[in-house]
Image (tube, rainbow, N blue to C red):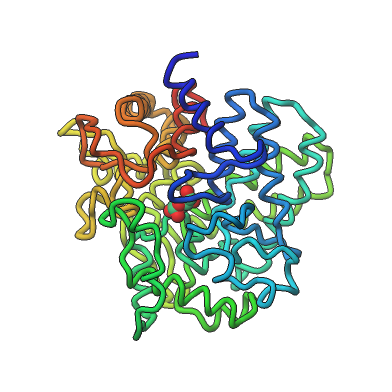
Amino acid sequence: MADHKLNAKKLLAYNRINNKYTIPSHNLYPHQWSWDSPWIMYGYTELKEFDNAENEIFSLFDYQWTNGLVPSIVFHNLENNTYFPGPDMWDLHITADHLTNKNNCTGIVQPPIHADACLKLFQKSKNLKFLEAIYPKLLKWHKYLYNERDINDEGLVYIRHPWESGMDNSPNWDESLNRINITEFKYSKMRTDNKKVNSDERPTDITYERYLYLINLFKECRFDEKQIFHKSEYIIQDVLFNTLLLKSNYALLEIVKILNYSNDINLLNYWINKTKASFESKFFKNDFYYDYDLKAEKLIENKTISGISAILTCEKPKLLVNSLKDNFLDIKNNNYNISSLDRNHNMFDSINYWRGPMWTNLSWLIISGLYKVNEIELANKIRLNCIKKIEEIGFYEYFNSNDTENKKSSGCGDNCFSWTAAMYICLTSNIKM
Ligand code: GLC
């Protein structure tokens, strides 16, 4: 095995706890995160570490709530309390005791990429028992999303916290968050993230106050989704979240065919058709797919990486290829880092988290979409750029999207980050999502 690939494998082993689950990184994220686990599973699958991949998903779904919610974080190890906000901020034993008897997790979700990762795992492992065991949990997860998070019955699921998007401080959330009036800075002083890594690469304090304000609102509503919907200012239908939902619905459809569970085929087709139709009619405008603010009842017209991610499942992928070239790459300067925000946007910041940097997981997703629509040359260029960057700089959480020389200093956030290692394995093997 080539050196770098071996290092990626070793990094995953270093971040894997008791051979059960894999933390994103020891420094910033010492717990299990919901959508990190499937990204990591793609890597394990490619390494043929099938047990690790299976344990990963079961460790997460063990914490699924009775209504089907899959928590964004599971705090398996309560002794490690260096992450803020930890379980005591959620108080689930009081606020959600009717929905879960496990208190060491959050009450929000992350994007539903799980079913796709499970299908890919089965396609390599051929372990039918695994598929039989995980399928009901995955179905219950999607039922929660459609039953509880689609208030207008449109086939589009909404998120109720920025952390649910996986893109914590995307400018798409600014307008909704600004409607939350903060009079006192109570929680941001308890932050640990901005002390562990460069604070210029992290969200601001007022954003953190609003993150915590929303958590308090959920607790007050005892996680009743309808109440939260009515009381909250932040209710968004996000393109990436619904793209992954659609992708995972296709995976579930394949899984039921493998398992011969023909009773569920109609439901899955119903979801797929409904989501697809609303996705095109609601998110698309002119040449791009935009998030929708359900409280202000309008599109959020920023070009972000969320819109580009639609390339995986949408009906107008060629328009997104144009936008990718014009807004997210800088081809005339030989820059093939996909930025997370339109480079011409006034908020663009090449090192600040989801406001400009390059992320390897979404790069792999977009690369997969490019191969699918036959943009082979462009896909190869972006892929090789990503590989070289990781090899020369390291397994960083994200990268300065203006860097074309692979300078050491352009690695951002945490180092030794699991999904970057997993993505490196997928990119070098050239497998697709
Ligand atoms: C950050 C990222 C999120 C990720 C988490 C753990 O919060 O924005 O997408 O899941 O870190 O890696």
State the image coordinates of residue 85 (x, y, percent, origin top left): 49, 65
Q: Is residue 304 above or below residue 171?
A: above
Q: Is 156 on the left-hand or right-hand side of 200? A: right
State the image coordinates of residue 9 (x, y, percent, origin top left): 52, 26
Q: Is 175 on the left-hand or right-hand side of 94? A: left
Query: At 42% across and 28% down in the image, what residue appears?
Result: 374
State the image coordinates of residue 247 (x, y, percent, origin top left): 58, 44
Q: Is 241 on the left-hand or right-hand side of 322? A: right
State the image coordinates of residue 27 (x, y, percent, origin top left): 44, 47
- The answer to whether residue 287 is seen in the rendering is no
Q: Is residue 66 above or below residue 33?
A: below
Q: Nearer the viewer, residue 324 or 80?
A: 80
Query: At 38% across and 25% down in the image, what residue appears?
Result: 376
Q: Nearer the viewer, residue 56 or 372?
A: 56
- The answer to whether residue 217 is seen in the rendering is yes
Query: At 27% across and 33% down in the image, what residue appears?
Result: 336
